[in-house]
Image: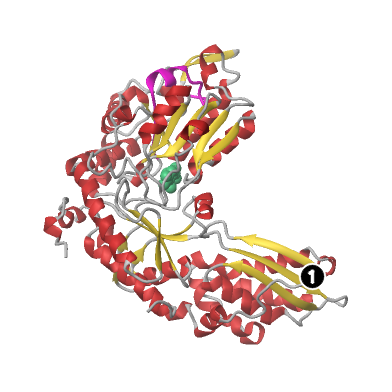
Amino acid sequence: MTTTDSLPVDVTALRADFAILSRTVRDGKPLVYLDSGATSQRPTQVLDAERRFVETSNSAVHRGAHQLSEEATDAYEGARATIASFVGVSPGEVVFTKNATEGINLVAYAMSNAGTAGPESERFALGPGDEVVVTEMEHHANLVPWQQLCQRTGATLTWFPVTDEGRLDLSELDSMITERTKVVAFAHQSNVLGTVNPVEPLVRRAREVGALVVLDACQSVPHGVYGQGAVDFGALGVDFAVFSGHKMLGPSGIGVLYGRRELLEAMPPFLTGGSMIELVRMEGSTFAPPPQRFEAGVPMTSQAVGLAAAVDYLNGVGMERVAAHEHLLAERALAGLSEIPGVRIVGPEDTVDRGATVAFVVDGVHPHDVSQVLDSLGIAVRVGHHCAWPLHRACGVPATVRASFYLYNEPSEVDALVAGVREAQRFFGVGE
Amino acid sequence: MQLESMYQEIILDHYKNPHARGLREPFDGESFQVNPTCGDEVTLRVKVTDDGKIEDVSYEGQGCSISQASTSVMTDLVIGHSVDEAMTTMDAFTELMQGRGQVEPDEDVLDDGIAFAGVAKYPARVKCALLGWMAFKDALARTSNGVEAG
Ligand SMILES: Cc1ncc(COP(=O)(O)O)c(C=O)c1O
């Protein structure tokens, strides 16, 4: 038995910050929230920060000369600095977006705009003969925008397959990424398999051929990397990266696009309008330097403040501890679930290069039915293809059950999951 | 929550021993339907006689107990009936499923279909229960007889 006081994180104390975790569901069952991979819960500190901002300084940033506007602008830019430093980059390299999905679309549309935007953005332009390389394990958010970009430009989409163990098959790395490759886009950590992908060989090969690397860090930035701590985009050497606030204790409605400064400086805008301009005449306009060039319109402010508070919260706990805590939970979940006859883990069965997202199927019980039984016990998991339909096809399953853990989950919740899966087998008359 | 209120015996029986399963020839219309949130799918065929009777409904697919059982129950409810009767039954079933548990089902019309009343309380599962019916409606629209009747 793991007792809670031997855990890397003081989970009992920390849970008190998350009011929702003490509610009950479905006729009085304590909530067991194992769906943080979809969206995480928010601590009081984040809500307080948002409320404080709205009650004291709320106004449009970068737009007025009054005191409130000054304060709001400081809060907004201060949030940018906090968030940038969390991922090892400078504030000017952080663009606020609605979510990660919008960040990826921003890059993909900037690239299709590049064809007509003048000489300095030529390096972003794509056409027939060029290739965009993704992987078979991508979330639709890091797949469909690239499919669409290829459709608009005539470029070709190719992808790395996934091995039977649920890891990227990089055996053909050098023939997959070639002089034709313009973009390499992949997930740092799979939102289904939990696999943490090796960034280094992909970045190295992309560099050799001059391709841009876009990292989908939605599932890595919130959780850190086991044995290392916070994800550091600067150290990873990627060109672009995205993540969403709502998956890391922050508000929904805010995401981050990181772009290397010299790239953002040369890249044409996606959305245009107010706040992103330098000079506007009836005949045409010029654009502000980054990051403003990519933030058209009045931006989300209390969300930025809330996300910075979430970063402070995570830093307060320490990302090494967060990752270590989740590592223990993943270990326990993998062990507990693999012990059940008829349960198959979809993804790596060990904890090497793996986060605390565990997808599985139960012989003879459809994932929907498993999750319904779990729900009746108060356990919230996700079911379906988790926006990674091609990956499920590659794994030969139509759908999976996915439990995803975070810093506020306890070992006893893992045990509840394992017991719940056994209950689903009993209810549907399969298993022992 | 009482799991049993959703998973009535009738549903579990149909799930374990589905009626009319398998794809058969000949057929007049075929439909492939998929639930984009979970990837469940069904391919369904209908055979309609010249005088507008549903002679056969055959299907193949993968899905949860609710979608499988609902498709099985549907075949019982429509095979041997006129297209018009089948449409009336479908409307009654759809109304039940979209009623959030507030609609009182009519056993004379829905027979085993009344077992799905509990499912209607779970919005996430309503699509599952309607998947086979959607395929049936679409397959029917693709037959020449069905188009006339519809
Ligand atoms: C790996 C991955 N990429 C992208 C996304 C998209 O994030 P969002 O919906 O916040 O834009 C998600 C979240 O669902 C994800 O898990």
Can the viewer see residue A299 in this picture? Answer: no
Residue A6, given in percent of the width and then of the height, sits at: 12, 56
The C terminus of chain B - image quarter: bottom right
Counting the numbered discs, the total is: 1
Left/right placement of residue A334 relative to residue A264 reads left
Residue A35, given in percent of the width and then of the height, sits at: 36, 56
Q: Please report the residue visible at 75 percent of the width from the left and 71 percent of the height from the top.
A: B46
Residue B125, given in percent of the width and then of the height, sits at: 51, 67
Comparing A201 with A223, the one in front is A201
Range of residues picked out in magenta: A254-274
Looking at this view, name the residue that lies furthest to the right: B50
- Type of colouring: secondary structure
Comparing A257 with A411, the one in front is A411
Residue on which the image places disc 1: B27
Left/right placement of residue A77 relative to residue A312 reads right
Residue A218, given in percent of the width and then of the height, sits at: 38, 42
Secondary structure beneath dot 1 equals loop
Label 1 Cα crowd, 10 Å radius (few <14 / some 14-19 / many 20+): some
Looking at this view, name the residue that lies furthest to the left: A5
User: Which chain is disc 1 placed on?
Assistant: B
Q: Based on the picture, tell me whether residue A160 belongs to the magenta stretch.
A: no
